[in-house]
Amino acid sequence: MDNKVITKIIKSQKLSKYKKNPIIYKYKKVSNYTKLTPLTYTVLLKNTKIVTNINKKKESHINLKRGDYVLCGIKNEKYGLPLEKILEIYDLGNIVSKPVIRKGFKLTKKNTSKSSNKSKIKIVPDWGGVQTLQVGDHILLTLDGKKYYGIEKKAFKKSYKKL
C-alpha cells in the first residue's frame, strides 16, 4: 500500500479545493447490484462484496453489510458505501409509499370482547416489539396475508380509505 506516500504528499503540499457538482441518483430495486444502470442506487439486503470496475479494469472492492448502499456512477461504475458515509455526503430525499391495497378490519368492542374504548389491546406487529392499540384502531395484514400490524384510528383516517 502507498498510504504513507499519499500521507507525505498531503502534509507537504498546498491542497486545492474542489466542489462536487450535485448528482441525482434514483432508487432501483435489483436482485444483484451489477444490474444497476447509470445514476441509480440500491440498498443491500444482505452482506455483499462490491467490485468497482472503470474502463473494464478493477479499481477497488469493498465488503458491505445489509443496509449499506451501492451506487452506479455516470460511467456505469458500481461502487459501494457504508450507510454512515452515505449519511455524511448525500442528501437523502423523500420516501413515497406505494399505493398498495391491504386487507384488514376495525377493532370493535364486539370483536375484541373489550367493554371500554380505552381498554388496551397489545399485539406483536409484523416488525416485532409490542404495539398497544384500543377499540377504534385498525388491524391491517401484510401483503402476503401472514402477519399484521395496527394503525391508530386518526392516523388510519388520514392514511387509508375503504374500497
Image (tube, rainbow, N blue to C red):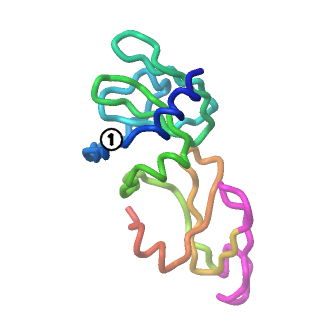
Image height of 14 relative to 51, above or below: below
Query: In the visual, does 128 lie left or right of 106?
Result: right
- Identify the amino acid type marked 1: Lys
- For the view shown, which residue lies furthest in the top direction? 56
Image position, residue 75 (x, y; %): 29, 23
Nearest the viewer among 52 and 119 is 52
Q: Image height check: is 13 above or below 112? A: above
Which residues are drawn in magenta?
109-130
Local crowd at mark 1 within 10 Å, few (<14), some, or many (≥20)? few
What is the residue that sits farthest to the front in this orientation?
Answer: 12
Residue lying farthest to the left in this orientation: 21
Question: Is the C terminus in the top left, top right, bottom left or bottom right quadrant?
Answer: bottom left
The quadrant of the rendering that contains the N terminus is top right
- The residue closer to the viewer here, 140 or 41, is 41
Q: Residue at x 68, y 89 (%)?
A: 118
Instruction: Specify the quadrant of the image occupied by residue 108.
Output: bottom right
Which residue is rendered at x = 41% and y = 34% of the image? 71
Instruction: Indicate whether 114 appears above or below 12.
Output: below
Could you say where residue 27 lies in the image, as x and y percent from the top left? 37, 41
Q: Secondary structure at mark 1?
A: strand
- Give me the residue at 40% from left, 22% from top: 35
Give the dominant element type of the magenta stretch: helix, strand or loop.
Answer: loop
Measured as percent of width and height from the top left, residue 38 is found at 30, 28
Q: Position of residue 4 (x, y in %)?
A: 58, 29
Q: Which residue is mark 1?
A: 26
Q: Nearer the viewer, residue 57 or 150?
A: 57
Q: Is residue 154 magenta?
A: no
Please name the residue shown 56% across and 70% down the image: 151
